[in-house]
Amino acid sequence: MSAISKSLVQKLKAAFPELHIVTPDSPDYAKSIERNIKNTQKPAGVVVYATSTKDVASLVEFTGANSLDVAVCGAGHSRIGASSTNGGVCIDLSKMQAISVDTNTNHITVQGGAVLQDVYMAVEKYGLALVGGLCSNVGIGGFALMGGYGWLTGAHGLAVDNIVRAEIVLADGSVVIASRSENPDLYWAIRGAGPCFGIATSIVFQGFVQGPVWSGELTFSPAALGALVEFANHVLNVSKGESSMVMIQGQLPGSTEPLVVVEVFYNGTEDEAKGFFAPLLKLGPIKDSTKMMPFSQTTGGGDDIPPGFGKGTGGGIMEPIDADFVESLYEDYLTFIKNVPDASESLIAYEIHPTYGTLLHSQNETAFPNRGTFGNVVIYAAYTKDESAPACEEWCRKMHDKIHNDFERRKEVDGVDDTTKTGVGLGESPKRLYGVNYERLVRIKRIYDPQNVFNKCVDLLKESEESSIIQ
């Protein structure tokens, strides 16, 4: 696929006179290619703001007919730059944010450009919530189609587990419905690898009745790390989804030294919550912002990621979580920020969502292959200077390898269940990332996107083609 020429830009403008089209000489060009992580930004040849499924379908047909590189942007949070294109056409969905609720079924229909906070606020008027993330300004499409962990995961599973159906624009510009009864193979594939198959212009989610919750942040000194890990294991061991937590290690914006911030969640009364989280409260947090609040106010954790440049990776961490291993990762972090002061606002985050909800579904019920008795670790290296990039990338690589190697080791020695044995721990390569579901995904990809138009999120066919050459 190629960049767009000036003559094709004029052809595009003539074909879509009613759409807002931004080119490098437009006053809002810089804003149109801005991304949450600066180093994922690329100079698009043109940015087109679609307003309907028909627009998206016609734009995809245009890019295909002219062999143009295409990217799709919801809210611009992809840490690998999947929402950016170098010289091609970026289809921006941010003007497609309609949200509706069917009160008979509690089905929530969301257009592909909506962000989580707006969805939460809209459905809360009906006394509902859905499985969504912790970062308020993340686009729901990219979040949900690649898995989707959130406060309600422990009770109701992942976002992909609650997709009822989706409207998908395929690589040839055709529009199809993916559901249990329509294109069931595509329905299976988009729930975990959605951006690899097309553009989701509308998604229907199962909603759940939801009232106020107890949530907020508890801030501790690093000396409390061992006790915090012990309590995290308690959450994983006993919770059926009513409680959850995220533990963040790092020097967050406004702090002068590394701290541990624990974001807590309890789906119940304040008395019940304080009883459950009493061991943490008794540790004497430096700061305590916990209180009863509407579910829509529980977002914000991901918003703590500092603006600027960044590198990110992640992995799985087996339960029970090993406090010594967590301490070793923290020591690695301290060494890193000492050696690279520009990266002092980097962080390590542990998502402690009870596995009860995710294990209600088998490893191959959807394309998402990361189910098991383990939590997630997110590594994020934040920096402000270009020269810091190589060191940050190297640190992320080393941390990824260390976490993955320990994950695989413990799967062998801990006597885990069959589902956990096939968990991938958020691997990096396509084959590792999708594990037991990889081969089926490739087969479906060859049916719906044989030219590999949608390859920016995960390039499913590249590894498959390389493997066939090697064989």
Image (cartoon, rainbow, N blue to C red):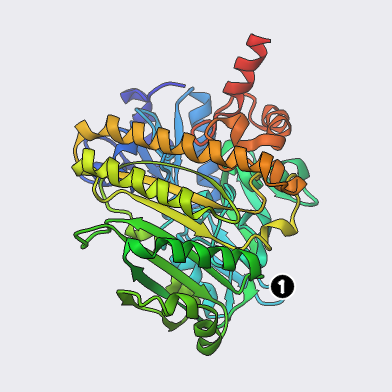
Query: Residue placed at 75% from the left, 44% from the top?
Result: 364
Image height of 400 relative to 206, above or below? above
> Residue most toward the bottom?
271
Vertically, is 297 above or below 357? below
Q: Percent x, y for residue 335?
A: 28, 42
Give the side of residue 340 with respect to residue 371, left or right: left
Depth check: 232 or 127 in front?
Answer: 232
User: Around disc 1, counting alpha carbons within 10 Å, would you say few (fewer than 14), some (14 to 19), or many (20 or more)?
Assistant: few
Is 22 placed left or right of 265 in the picture? left
Residue ID at (45%, 60%): 115
Q: Nearer the viewer, residue 208 or 301?
A: 301
In the picture, residue 225 is in which quadrant? bottom left
Residue type for callout 1: Thr
Residue ID at (39%, 58%): 248
In the picture, which quadrant includes the C terminus?
A: top right
What percent of the width, then of the height, locates residue 245?
A: 50, 66
| Tag 1 residue | 105
What residue appears at the point 68 percent right and 29 percent down from the top-left corner? Answer: 442
Q: Secondary structure at mark 1?
A: loop
Q: Quadrant of residue 2?
A: top left
Choose between 421 and 156: the one closer to the eye: 421
Is residue 19 in view from this perspective?
no
Residue 109 percent coordinates (x, y): 60, 63
- Residue 373, horizontal then vertical, whole percent: 65, 54
Q: Looking at the picture, does residue 297 appear above or below residue 228?
A: below
